Amino acid sequence: MQTLDWTRATAIASEIAGGWAEARGPGGAIVLFDTAGPRGVGAGGFASMEHGIPFTAETPSRYASISKHMLAATLLLEGFDLDAPLGALLDDLPPAIGVVPLGRALDMTGALPDMMEVLWQQGVPFTASLSAAELFSILRRLHSTCAVPGTEMAYSNTGWRLAQMAIPAQRGVSYVEALERRLTGPLGLPITLPLDEAEVVPGLATGYWRDGEVWRRGRYGLHFSASGGLAGSAAALTRWAGALMAGRGPLDGILEQLTAPRGFADGSPSAYRLGLVCTALGGTPLVVHGGSLPGYRNHLLMAPGLGVGVALLSNREEDAFWPALRVMAALVGEAMPEPAANPTGLYAAEQGPFWAELLPGVIEYMGGQEKLVASADGGFRSLPAYLDIRLRPAADGALEGLVGGAARRLLPVPPGLPLDPGLVGHWREQEFGAELTVRADGTARFPWAGGTGMETRLTPLPGARALASLTHAMWRHRPCLWRDADGALCLAGHRARVLRFLPCP
């Protein structure tokens, strides 16, 4: 039986939080817990820099995407059929989206375009204030999915937005009412669902991000939804997670259902389940999920076999997974993963929009970033916070393996490539009217903020493709431009690959 070292793990949590306090900036709370409740806390830094309010384990913050598995638990308790197509649960969905089963919408294999990325690609910033109804009206105009459902895992909040809408459509009550009736009420949890950033949450920590040497407030204008909208403290989150591992009250058997194997259409397994990722630290199985909103980064790690966990909530735009993993490693007596000795540089598939850029120990795949660790086969893999990546170098310098369950072969991109003239021109997206211009000198003007436009210098890829680099506040978007078989200019990120631009007359 593994020995749990609460003293050492709490000391590491305090060390991490002490760094936040010493820097006199935003902070966070790290709570170690078991099924009975919190066992150790490290907290530091400010919940509000403006007012000098300290961040504690009782400070409400935004859970962001940690919210997802709570919606999944609610859906299970409400008796929803995971095999039901979305079109049977909601009216007025486009046919390609309506046929996707609810389970695939939740386990990220449904190929549903993520609405934030779809909006960014047509020039609508994530700071724009859009309601749930406005987002749904845009979704209804999307006539395809990013890929064939069931062929790969690609992170998307859209399925979760639709699942939330299915509750009032099928049960006649809002998700907030169902959540309170099924979970937060019986468990006595002070967890709320504000609809957007304008809704007042008493005591809520302000989110911050670093702009050079200056801290700035984070902002997210879109309707939050159950995909990432819950707010509560680290203490409340650990009470939830402890009850989930113990199967207490309404949660009897729910964790087993949330983490039950999910697979691709070919029968191969996926690490991503219903709002939770199943992975391992050494010989200790873990169930994890993170959350990110502008100015907030969080992670929840549970070791159900040991009945213990670590929750990290922060109001600073920094990685939360690896600090939380350090604490978990100390708690359960496992070594931290060995860093990957991966090659570096830019890579792209022979065809299509698939690309990756590697730095030491890090991979950015089509805009999403994961840290890399060494794998037993001589390659490298992610310890998935979200996306399961398993690659190894081939004899010709290519990288081969699986990304999100899909086979990928990525070739090194030669330096100094010229821009393919087939990309040059003025292009218009037919459904939404967004326009972009690609110039022969390798620059491009992308749609942005109602005609303002955003300039970028393109990075050419082989095969009439190129990468853009678009920055808004703390986030960078790197869509791939490529020509499809019909000659349309397509924009593709990992989360959205549905916009097609045709030449302007």
Image: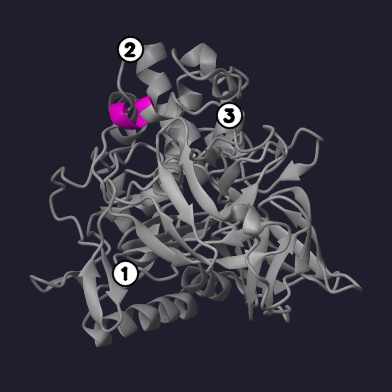
Please tell me which of labels 3 and 1 falls first in the chain: 3
Disc 1 marks which residue? Answer: 316
Q: What SS does tag 2 mark?
A: loop
Q: Secondary structure of the magenta portion, mostly?
A: helix
Q: Is residue 481 above or below residue 190?
A: below
Let me know if residue 285 appears in the view: no
Please tell me which of labels 3 and 2 falls first in the chain: 3
Q: Is residue 330 above or below residue 310?
A: below
Find the distance from the CA under tag 3 to the CA under tag 2. 29 Å
Q: Is residue 135 magenta?
A: yes
Find the distance from the CA under tag 3 to the CA under tag 1. 36 Å
Disc 2 marks which residue? Answer: 172
Q: Nearer the viewer, residue 224 or 243?
A: 224
x, y percent for residue 373: 68, 73
Disc 3 marks which residue? Answer: 144
Q: Is residue 451 magenta?
A: no
Q: Residue at x 62, y 46 (%)?
A: 272
Q: What SS does tag 3 mark?
A: loop
Q: Crowding near pointer 2: few (<14 within 10 Å), some, many (20+)?
A: few
Q: Residue at x 45, y 25 (%)?
A: 141
Let me know if residue 224 appears in the view: yes
- Residue numbers of the magenta segment: 133-137
Q: Name which residue type carries label 1.
A: Arg
Q: What SS does tag 1 mark?
A: loop
